[in-house]
Image (tube, grey):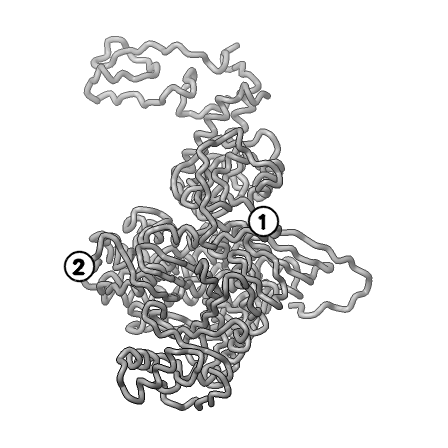
Amino acid sequence: MTAEDGTPPAGEPPAASGAPDAGAADAGAAERGADDAEPSAAQVEADYLATTIWAQVDAALSGITATPVTAEEERSVIDLVVRIPPRELVAGLRALRSSEDLRFDYLRCLTAVDLEEEGVDIVYHLYSIGGKQNVTVKCRLPADRLEVGSATAVWRAANWYEREVQEMFGVRFEGHPDPRNLLLPEEMTDVFPLRKSHPLAEIEVLQGEGIAYEEGEL
Amino acid sequence: MVTSTPEREFETQELLINMGPQHPSTHGVFRMVLGIDGELVTEVVPYIGYMHRGAEKLCETMDFRQGVGYMDRTEYLANFNAELSYVMAVEKLAGIEVPERAQWIRMILCELNRLSSHFMFTGAFGTDVGVFGTAFVYSFREREVIQDLFEEITGDRLMYAYFRPGGLGWEVPDNFEQRVQEVLLSAERGIRDMDGLLTQNEIFLARTKNVGVIDAPDAIDWGMSGPSLRASGVPMDIRRDEPYLYYPQLKFDVITGETGDVFDRYYVRLQEMRESVRIVEQCMERLRPGPILPERMPRMLRTPPGEVYVRTEAPRGEFGIYLVSQGGNRPYRLKIRSACLSNLQALRDMTIGHYVADAVIILGSIDIVLCEVDR
Amino acid sequence: MAMSPSRPPGATSDTPVQAPPLPGAPAEPHIAPLLPVEHPADAPGLVPVERRPGKALYKTLLPGVLQVPADLVLAMGRKSSLWPMTFGLACCAIEMIATYMAHYDLDRFGIVPWPSPRQSDVMIVAGTVTKKMAPAVKLLYEQMPNPKWVISMGACATNGGPYTRYDRVLQGVDKIVPVDVYVPGCPPRPEALIDALISLQEKIIEDRKVLGA
């Protein structure tokens, strides 16, 4: 949500707090549903959000455009998934880390999902050791601009995970302190093995002499 | 312990020492370049990826049930724990209810696997510290006993592929309960032996105490997990904090260390082995006859679109499976969250400022499995 | 001459060793003992067997003095003290360690793990060889002194195994180093590795002319 919409305080009931975002249509629908109770889908959505920690996450993310993922085919079975646009991502992550009641101080996992022409999703799994709560932050990068800010300043744990995503998916993390390849050879910067377009290898039937690799070919 | 460089009386030259990728004490194919000033380590640059073989990519081309085999080969010292994360992820996505007996047997096997994995750690770590051979021989004696039981159940010594989405591959043998009791007896003896061989050894204590200290905020920031994190005094155990299987019904303690040094990382693991014995004993009391697979399992397992991140407490820490499905019978994306990768990131912080001889035991104390790091 | 006691003189390596039948055992004339056993010709149920024609590995010059070719002595020395390099790559390394340990006890074959390539004879490639690791494997092989042998342990080292379709994995270690014995299995049991080492010992005896003195 954005700041000019009027940020609801932390204690507000979860059904209404997912609301005032001009950019996100589904969140707006949740508010209408609370008023006149006409589309049941919105009510289902609000009920789903009420079972999650969206209210607290929303409070922590004041001033940042964040939308919860509520569609059944996209949301996670266990955790709440929140989408943040790329330009506000690092600020959002920092806000989640420094929020008062839920201090997401532990970066469980950082990875990416290649959606081919739709771009790449960067996925952050966060955990609050004190509050024992989880949230998943997603960020969709367009296919023609695979760039996002680095989270290494927020959690040092992001360092190797970002290097891995960079070499495997070709996403550039701006401000990464050490953007070398992690798993692949260091000079291999134009091959992205975990992309869907990267083919599997052909099985070489021949063995023994004749197809021995030369130096530098490996 | 040396925390700061002592005053120099004469000029020394900085050297770079390469360790690995093949080195007897790197626990696999791990390479690190140590910057040395005299005997002190001034810089550590780890290089990984020598065992990167694309388990995630290959799983995306395989049926859900076939992926179990890759989990075994990814985390080959705690296979059952790795399989558990994967099958739980598939079950959560597909909405499969697992019968009670299958869950209890899973818990028993996972805890026994934790025992055998920690025995591997004590053996390898003892070798690193200098109890060459002895610790390894004793720990492999215990591992063979546990592996024999696993072989009787699953048919293989190392790659079990026994957990299936929905339950287990087949029923355990008839003498399962008696065999587990025998294994527990032997494991208790083994824990006692290790305690006597290592914990009460003065040289061992002198080498491990106050070496490689990492404090709690740093450990959390680096994303460490499992015994390595608990040694720093953070009581984070997924079995207790975010319960899965039937762990809430059981009594067990979460062991934490105090200083976060190499000795604590060893001692937390040793104590955890005692807890694992306790857990298995309680599980055996609650094990009842029953089905081990749901009544109706589809021949072709399909999941609705969605995603799930399942994490379980493996012997080395949090083993997570992030599974994205777009419908169909194979994962769209499978990410293996490796505990060792995060633990290994903190190696640089732990090692700098110590003697070069301690670099090896600090690496040994975080108990890495390189196949899990590189996947 | 230090031949194993179970193998009587005159037996070449392809002659199966069989215990002589027990005196009280029922006679089975079609399963004749293959080795010369001295029995009285009129003993009931026992048929004397003629010595198989074969080339003896040595000559008896005088009683108690044998003449043995030097290459045989060298080959037997080599085969009886194989030192494999401790070189674990992946999962197979765990089974390799288990084979060295007390339960399977490779030491009784004179096989001792050695942590340096410069003093070892055998490289057991235990695990997947990735293309990033391949130059290091090749370098290790080149660092070993001659004569040297390579055992490819497990499916991954042999042809890539379950990871063969991933393009960062080398499809078999025999593309970079010559392999003497392949061990099937994923991972092979310790017995399979012991069998591979015994096969390698036989191969060393058979190849002694090629390797030379």
Q: Residues within 10 Å of mark 2 (few under 14, many from 20)?
A: few
Residue at point 52% right, 35% down? C175
Residue at point 46% right, 31% down? A206
Q: Is residue C140 left or right of residue B278?
A: right
Q: Residues within 10 Å of mark 1 (few under 14, many from 20)?
A: many
Pair 2/1: label in front? 2
Q: Which residue is mark 1?
A: B21
Callout 2: SS: loop
* Amino acid type assigned to the residue bearing label 2 in the image: Glu
* Amino acid type assigned to the residue bearing label 1 in the image: Pro
Q: Chain of mark 2?
A: B
Q: Chain of mark 1?
A: B
Q: Quick check: A172 above or below A68?
A: above
Residue at point 70% right, 70% down? B4
- Image coordinates for residue B165, horizontal then vertical, percent: 28, 58
Q: Is residue B252 visible?
A: no
B267 vs B322, nearest the viewer? B322
Screen quadrant of the N terminus of chain B: bottom right
Q: Quick check: B77 above or below C51?
A: below
N-terminal-most mark, 2 or 1: 1
Q: Which residue is mark 2?
A: B295
- Image coordinates for residue C86, horizontal then vertical, percent: 53, 43
The picture quadrant where one finds residue B218 is: bottom right
- Image coordinates for residue A55, horizontal then vertical, percent: 40, 84
